Amino acid sequence: EIAQCLVGSEMCIRDRNMGERYLYQKCPFLKEVGQERREQFETYFRTAPDWLIDAFVVEKMKKGTTFIRENNPADTIYFIIEGLIVATDYRVLGISYDFMQFRKMYAFGGMEFIMDLDVYKTSLRTVTDSIAVKISRPMFEKWMYSDIKALKYESQQMGEYLLEQARNERIFLLMNGTDRLCLLLVNHYEQYQKKGVLCVKEGQKSLADKTGMCLKSINRAVKRLSEQGLIEKQGNKLLVGKQQYEEMKALISEKTDME
C-alpha cells in the first residue's frame, strides 16, 4: 500500500509538472509577469485541461479601459495577470465610487457563474495598462462542472473577495474624512510609489470619488494632513514620502486591525 501511495504521488507530481509546462507553452508571456501574480495563475489553472488552455484569449488593455460593465451580459471570464484594476459603482446620484482595488488575481465573472447570474454585478476598470486572459463563460462552466477541485478553489476565491470587500466597507463607514484619505494614500503608496515617493497627480474630484466624500470634505482632509506634515502639496500634486507613509499607516492601524 505504501508503494502504491508513492507511485500515485509521483504520478500526480509528474502530471502537475506536465500541466505547468503546457501552460507555459501556450502562455509564454507568463515568464515576464511578476512572481506573485504568476504563481497565482499557476495555482488557479493547476488542474485545467489542455482544451481550456487552448481556448485562452490574451488581450492588452490601456489604462482607463472599462472592460466589464454592470448589467451587461456576463459572457466572459477575465483574469488580470498584469496591471491594476478597480471596481466602480455608479448607482448613487450618478456619482462614480471606486470601492475596491485588486492586488490578487481573481476570475472576474466567476462570481456571476457561481451565483447563476446572467449579467455582471459591478463595473471594472483598468488603473494601469494591463494584460488579461479571457475565457468564454461556456468554456469556463464546462471546466468547473467537470473539475470539483477547480470549482472548490473558485468558490474559496469568491468568498475571500466578498469578505475583504465587506470588511473594507465597514472600515470606511466608520472612518472620518481624514482617516479615509489616509487609508487611500496608504494603499496608493503600497501600489504606486517610486523610489520611496508617491506622487498623486489626480485632482480632488478623483479623490472624492475614491473615498465616497464630497469635494468640500476632501479639501478639508487634504488641508488637515498637510498641516500635520503627513503629505506635501506641490501645486496640484500631493507627495507622500516613506516616513509620511509609515506615520499614516500607523495612524490607521491604531483605529483598525489592519497590518
Image (cartoon, helix red, strand yellow):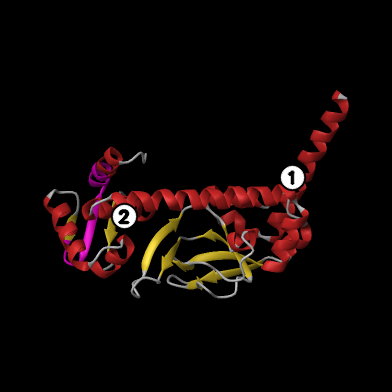
- In the rendering, at what x and y percent does residue 18 appear? 77, 48
Please give left or right for residue 39 compared with residue 188 in the image: right
- Counting from the top left corner in percent of width and height, residue 64 is at 42, 72
Name the residue at 21% across, 62% down: 218
Q: In the picture shown, does residue 46 fall above or below 27?
A: above
Q: Disc 2 versus disc 1: distance between alpha carbons? A: 41 Å
- The residue at which mark 1 appears reads as 17
Residue 180 image offset from top left, x and y in percent? 27, 53
Whether residue 97 sits left or right of residue 56 in the image: it is: left
Indicate yes or no whether the magenta region holds residue 116.
Answer: no
On-image quarter of the C terminus: top left
Tell which tag, 2 or 1, sits nearer the viewer. Answer: 2
Q: Residues within 10 Å of mark 2 (few under 14, many from 20)?
A: some
Image quadrant where residue 141 sits: bottom right
Query: Among all residues in the image, which is located at the extreme top?
Result: 2
In the picture, measured across the screen, residue 108 lies left or right of residue 187, that is right
Q: Quadrant of residue 115?
A: bottom right
Amino acid bearing label 1: Asn
Q: Residue at x 30, y 60 (%)?
A: 211
Read off the magenta span: 234-248
Q: Which mark is residue 119?
A: none
Q: Please state which of residues 137 and 40 is positioned toward the viewer in this rendering.
A: 137
In the figure, residue 48 lies in which quadrant? bottom right
Q: Nearer the viewer, residue 49 or 110?
A: 110
The relative height of residue 33 versus residue 204 in the rendered view (above or below) is above
* Element type at mark 2: helix
Q: What residue is shown with label 2?
A: 184
Residue 3 seen in render: yes
Q: Secondary structure at mark 1?
A: helix
Amino acid under label 2? Leu
